[in-house]
Image (cartoon, rainbow, N blue to C red):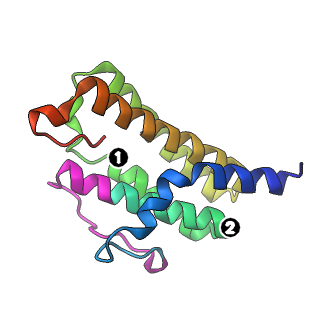
Amino acid sequence: MSAALRTFFMIVGTSGAVLAGLFWPPQYIRAEQKVSLIPDRAGLSTTELMCQKLNGSNQALKGLVSADFELLLHGARDLHDVSEQPGWGVAEADPAYRHFHVEFRRLSLKLVRMSESKNLEGAAYTFQNMTGTCIACHQHVRDVVKLGDAGESTDE
């Protein structure tokens, strides 16, 4: 199997979780605009931060499938910027949650590096791992930490 075909299958195989975000309400930014929805994210709720992460994921995925490294880089930077914002502390006392958060930040930086070096295969692999980390974190918060029972957001 050629490298291009492997990259294609890797992107398609991991994009299902993110593709739902392509149909997110239209008030959220379209990837073609290549600007942050809310440049100053300080004070946003966890749900608002998650919407920002979803927007960055959409941009990164669109950049991956179209080999648009500028769009991919913008999405990757947005993902990392959002992960650096305060407001993720709803489950910080939980060691597994802290691990997922640190891993997401590490992978978002790696995605930035892969984008800057125009490494499509590396970026696709990193995006796949980042998506898996998101899914595992949400499962942990939903099923183990159970923040939703206390009336708080179950977002990462």
* CA–CA distance in space, label 1 to label 2: 24 Å
Element carrying mark 2? loop
Q: Can residue 47 be found in the magenta stretch? A: yes
Return the x and y of residue 133 as percentages of the image width and height: 47, 36
Residue 65 in view of the camera:
yes
- Which residue occupies the foreground of this view, 18 or 115? 18
What segment is highlighted magenta in the picture? 32-51
Vertical arrangement, residue 15 with respect to residue 71, above or below = above
Compared across the picture, whether 124 is left or right of 80 comes to right
Q: Residue at x 56, y 44 (%)?
A: 110
Disc 1 packing (10 Å; few <14; some 14–19; many ≥20) = many
Quadrant of the image containing the C terminus: top left
Residue on which disc 1 sits: 83
Vertical arrangement, residue 34 with respect to residue 21, above or below = below
Q: Can residue 151 be found in the magenta stretch? A: no
Residue on which disc 2 sits: 67
Q: Residue at x 28, y 76 (%)?
A: 27
What residue occupies the far bottom of the structure in this picture?
Answer: 33
* Circle 1: residue type: Ser
* Circle 2: residue type: Ala
Q: Main secondary structure of the magenta part?
A: loop
Compared across the picture, whether 20 is left or right of 27 comes to right
